[in-house]
Amino acid sequence: MEKPLIMSESNALSVVVLAGGISHERDVSLRSGRRVADALTAAGHRVVLRDPDASLLPFLASERPDVVFPALHGSSGEDGSLLELLAALQIPTVGSTAEGARCAWSKPVASSLVAAAGLEAPESIVLSHESFRELGAASVLTVVRERLEGDVVVKPASGGSAQGVSIVESPDGLARAMVEAFTYADVAVVERRVFGTEIAVTVVDTGDGPRALPAVEIEPMAGVYSFQARYNAGETTFYAPSRLDDSVIAAASNAAVLAHRTLGLRDLSRIDFIVDREGRPWFLEANVIPGLTETSLVPLAIEASGATASALYSELVRSARARAA
């Protein structure tokens, strides 16, 4: 096991970790932020944990930390807005550019881009809440059912942690699933369900180009990787590395790196797939600021790679600092 990278005082960086925010994923973000802050502190860096609020930008402009490490899930950190402001302040930041974040934040945009690059993505129909009401829910649902026969997955077009996501196994459940998705976003995606094994591939780039960490296989006790299954210990079994064949994992790893590059992501991302019964990985979504909690997938992938969170996060902040030099 790789030992934590301990910085000498002269090499330590001042790092502001951002966590919290006002999105639906605030609590998860706070847990991620604390883990990141602890890991960077253990590596010897000088760390301040901050919640984004009205005092944040003046604080950053005044204090000029060496690096900002966002651990903000949901729109607070992943829609590109904050990243754009950090770039305007010329403060080195771990993670993707605002442009990359915007591409990944919209699930329909991300799916279209990776499909154009040659990856498999489930067939889907994208509906705004406004069109759903204007055209009549009954008529819209009829068209959707005729086009996407069988089981479907309904989800908000943006957001994470499986909030607002429903698996619909009968036509009667589609209307309720649409209402649930619209609770979290103004646009919903209805996609054909792909049956298989869910895996997550973490992609990291500390300056030498993106590389995939060992894939993590996900086996929810209830059969669905819901919000509860993600963040309640004991509700999901994880296999890191995955039990799938090496050739399948290689294909998924290559697909994850291709998705990372295609979407213009940087430093750290998590790409989620369903591997079907023929061993083909189907792209589900890309996570610009993936969960970093004690039950999250990225820390499991880091451990499976033989590294430590302290060492990897330290490499990321030093790479972000060097990039801005």
Image (cartoon, grey):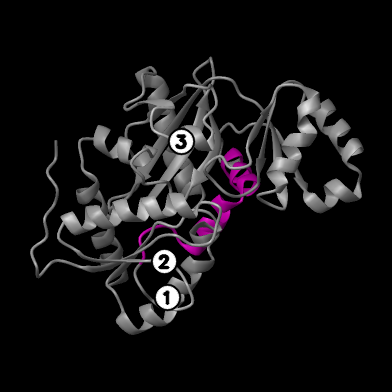
The answer to whether the residues at label 2 and label 1 have Cβ atoms under 8 Å apart is: yes
Provide the residue designation for mark 3: 230
Q: Residues within 10 Å of mark 2 (few under 14, many from 20)?
A: many
Residue 244 picture location, percent across and down: 39, 18
Q: Amino acid at mark 2?
A: Asp
> Residue 285 at what x, y percent from top left?
54, 41
Start and end of the magenta stretch? Answer: 93-115
Q: Quadrant of the C terminus?
A: bottom left
- Quadrant for the N terminus in the image: top left
Sequence-earlier tag: 2 or 1:
2
Figure quadrant of residue 168: top right
Tell me which corner region of the image, top left, top right, bottom left or bottom right, holds residue 216: top left
Q: Mark 2 sits on what residue?
A: 51
The residue type indicated by label 1 comes to Leu
Q: Which mark is residue 56?
A: 1
Residue 61, horizontal then vertical, whole percent: 38, 82
The answer to whether the residues at label 3 and label 2 have Cβ atoms under 8 Å apart is no
Tell me how far mark 3 sits from mark 2, CA to CA: 23 Å
* Label 1: which secondary element: helix
- The residue that appears at 42% across and 75% down in the rendered structure is 56
Tag 2's secondary structure? loop
